[in-house]
Structures are given as C-alpha cells and as structure tokens.
Amino acid sequence: MRSVRVRILAIFAVLVIAGVGAWQLLPTGEAKTGAITVGTSDIVTSLDPAGAYDAGSWAIYSNIYQSLMTFKPGAIVPEPDAAESCAFVGQKLQTYQCKLRDDLTFSNGRKITAKDVKYSFDRIFAIKSDVGPAGLFPTLDTVSTEGRTITFNLSGKDATFPQKLATGAAAIVDPTKYPKDELRKGNQVDGSGPYVLKSYEPDARAELVPNLKYKGALKKTGEAVDIRYFKASEDLLSAWNSGEVDIAHRQLPASKLAELDEGDPELRVTEAASAEIRNIIFNTRENSPFGKKKVRQAVAALLDRGPLVSKVYQGTVEPLYSLIPTGYIGHSTSFFDAYPTSDPKRAEQLLQQAGVETPVPVDFAYREGDMYTKETAELRRQLEKDGLFKVSVKAVEWTRYQKGYAAGEYDMYTVGWFPDFPDPDTFSQPLVGTGNVLHSGYSSKKMDQLIAATQQFSDRGRTSNDFKEMQKLVGEDVPLLPLWQKKDYVVAKTDVAGSQYLSDGTGFWRLWELSWI
C-alpha cells in the first residue's frame, strides 16, 4: 500500500512538566477496563472468509483470522505473519513458497499445519461463492504442501501474489470447523488472529477479546473491543451523540464530517487520504440497455461530478476521473480527457448513433442507506434532466444487493471499492478483467492482455505505461464510470488512544492499536 499521509486535525496537549512524575499526569479516577466500543455503518456479510469480498467483512477478518502475510500501516511490501518466511522460487514469478511458523494454534487450541493453509485455499474454489474472493486469485493453479512448506503454483506470472496473501481472502481456517464444500453456518469463528470472537449478533454487534494464543507479526494484542453495526450513517451519528460508541468510523454523515472542528476539545479526529473509490457499474450483457457501448458513453458524457462532491458529500470526497485513484502507479485522468464537461448534446448524438429511442428506460439499483439515497437521487436527476434517460431506482439491502448484481438483475448499479492490497492491480483484474467480481459481464481480450502485462514485473514502476493504456481503454469502453475518491475519517473520544492507527485509508482495521488513556 502506498504510504498514506495522515493529518491529525485535533491534536491534544501532551503535558511535559519538569520535575513532575508521570503519575501526576494520569487521571485521578480509576482506569477504564471495559471494552472500547467502535461504531460503523459497514456490514459483515459472512463470517466465513470463503463467502465474502467486502470491506465490512474484511475489516473484522484482519482481527479474528490470520493470513500468511500482513501489511504494517503505510507499507507497500507485505511481511510474514502466520508464515516464517515467503518468497518466489526462481525468476519466473510462477512459483511462490511460504514456510509456516511452527508455534501457531487456532483459538480453540488446535495446532495449525501447512495442510490447513492448503485446505483454506482449496475450499474457496470448491465453494466459489458468487460474492466470495475466488476472483482475487485468477492465476492460482494448485497449492501443495511438504512439511511446513506451502507451494503456490501459478498459471501465469503474478508479481502481486505476495500482496494477495496478506488479504482477508487468504485467511486460514480450521478444517474441522469449516466444511470443504459449503460455507460454515452459525456465528462461531475459529481463527488465529489477535482477537477471538466472543459473541456475534448479525448486523448489530461483535464482541472481541484478545487472543492469548496469538503468534505472528504483532508484538502485542490490544484491549477488548465491542463493535457496533448500524444500518445507516444517521444511526451511527445518533449513537455517537448519545455516547454509545467511543470511536466512529465508516461512516458518519457527510454533513457531520464537514463541520468537524479542529479545536473541539471533546473530539479526536484523524483524516487520512484514502484509496476508497465509488463507481457506477454497467451491466454490459446484450439484454441490457448498456449492452451497447455508445449508451454507456452517453452516461459518461452527461455526468457532472461537481454536485456529488459539493452538495451530496459536502467536500468529504474528491472527483475521480480514472479507474485507478490518485496516489497509485499509473494513475491518469482518462475520463476527464474523454468527457471533460457535462455535454447533453454529445450524449444525445451518442444515443442516436446507438440506434436507441429516448428516453432510454433503465433500472438503477443502489445499496440501501441514507447517503446512497441522496447520491442516487442526484445521479438520476442528471440522467433525466435532458430527457435522454428514464430511470427507475431501487434501494436494496446490502447482502441481497450483492447477489442481485452478481445475477445480472440490474442495468446499472453503484459499488464502492477498497484496495485489496497496495498496488494498482487491485483496481484492474477484479474490476474490469474477464469474470470480474463486479459481475458486469464486461470482457475484452485487449484488457486481459494489459492486465497480464502489468503482472510481469516485480519492479512495479515498469507497469505505469500499461496501466495508463488500460485506463484509456476503460474510458473508451466504459464498463464502469468513476465517481469519487473518499477521504477517511476516524472520530474518537479523547480517552481513547491509538485511534489514529485504526485505519490508514485501506480496508484493514487495526483494533489492537486501541487502548484507554
């Protein structure tokens, strides 16, 4: 992951008084010992790593499960976690080996073996959930083991494979608890991460306690944490205002974030640059109105990101004009180059060239939520204001929403995207490659060739031109339409330490960094 610039908006005084013992700087009351409560409007769609590929699920995975590799905050090179060591074998970038630590156990006490790692990967492809992470490993052919050594055999070069081993998709599970060919039922977890899931109530609460059996890259585990899940950002705001949560992350309403005061002594706010993006995804199948490229181009010609940024999100996001966000190798502004301003006349000409009658009727689906409702209303207004489209909108609960777009039920839909790992590859194969995880139906031989070309080099600087060519192609084919890139905010009470390390603008949640002051 790129180094993320973190700017602390509210810096609270650290008293340094000569001749005064540290004990005099501590509160006179009893130290807090209860769980730290973290509130979020993200949702966990599955506790089983083979069944989820979303930010809410992966945030908790990084705490209750363990992968062979991990990332330290701001790092772009992964380091061993469950592994003792990992490296490519030879120069072809098609064989990758890891040696498992010999002191690992699952939280239930069972010793972890290399065969458990192989099992964890094999079941991802055996289950192949339509909302699971199999699409993250298009080059993984087979996994074999010998003693504590795990060998990953790839069908083609993939310089980013080590980074993929640091994601929630590579979480190691216990074969005695997780079925080989179906997702685990119930709300129990057997992992080896720094936390143990003590209890879980779907869409409401997760209680985490430190895993005393944890061994890995971390030198310590943190405090007990109580995660509270809220259906909407307004619900999270209400809980924050009433003191029900100690930390709010992802996502308070934009109106609240926009009014945060640097000098407020009651808050600690961390703002970080983020690679979280949001796109309109088009169903490019023949039976969809967007099966024709020029119809997709017409939407790109109409779009004005300004009102989204200023009115809907009140400056808490930045307009995005490319597949790859700013801060990543190969970033360009292909959509600004091709569609610099909103141009209704050009959009009308494109629709005429496509041979379709206007207004074009389309179904526009979005994830249920207050902010997404406002966003969709603005996008609908833009599409309909010149009489070129007739938009029917539908709000869908998140889990059902994922299954709906995976089945091709919607003509167009919006999806937010977190980087899986700190490399532009995370925005290419998963989003616009053949068989992409967005289920857009888009497939291009030229695109797949460009994706393969970018995976050839360990020196990632050599991929820049191919990524720029890829983005130019996305601007021409428009399988998706970039909307914005978000800033990341963590808001905490002043008696919580470590909140600035909770997130670095990625999908990782480092709950072990939190403690009471």
Image (cartoon, rainbow, N blue to C red):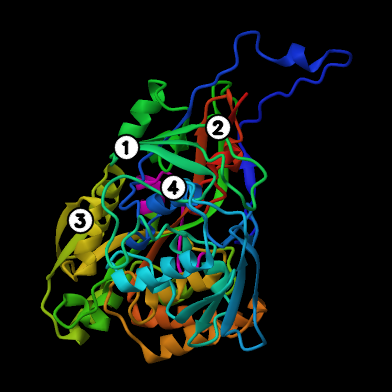
What residue sits right under mark 4 in the picture? 60
Residue annotated with mark 2: 223
Which numbered disc, 4 or 3, marks the residue closer to the eye? 4
Determine whether the residue tagged by mark 1 lies in a helix, strand or loop: loop
Residue depth check, mark 1 versus mark 2: number of the one nearer the observer: 2
Q: Identify the amino acid type marked 2.
A: Glu
In this picture, residue 183 sits left or right of residue 426: left
Mark 1 or mark 4: which is in front? 4
Point out the tag, 1 or 4, that comes first from the N-terminus. Answer: 4
Label 3 crowd (10 A; few <14 / some 14-19 / many >=20): few
In the rendered image, residue 223, in percent from the top left (x then y), is placed at 55, 32
Gap in Å between the C-alphas at discs 1 and 4?
A: 15 Å
Q: Please name which of the two marks, 3 or 2, marks the residue nearer to the observer.
A: 2
> What's the magenta region?
307-325
Question: Disc 1 versus disc 3: distance between alpha carbons?
Answer: 17 Å
Q: Position of residue 216 (x, y in %)?
A: 62, 52
Label 1 close to label 3 by CB (< 8 Å): no
Label 1 vs 3, first from the N-terminus? 1
Query: Dot 3 lies on which element?
Result: helix
Residue identified by numbered label 3: 400
Tag 1 residue: 230
Horizontal side of residue 290 vs 111, given as left or right: left
Q: Earlier in the sequence, mark 3 or mark 2?
A: 2
Helix, strand or loop at mark 4: helix
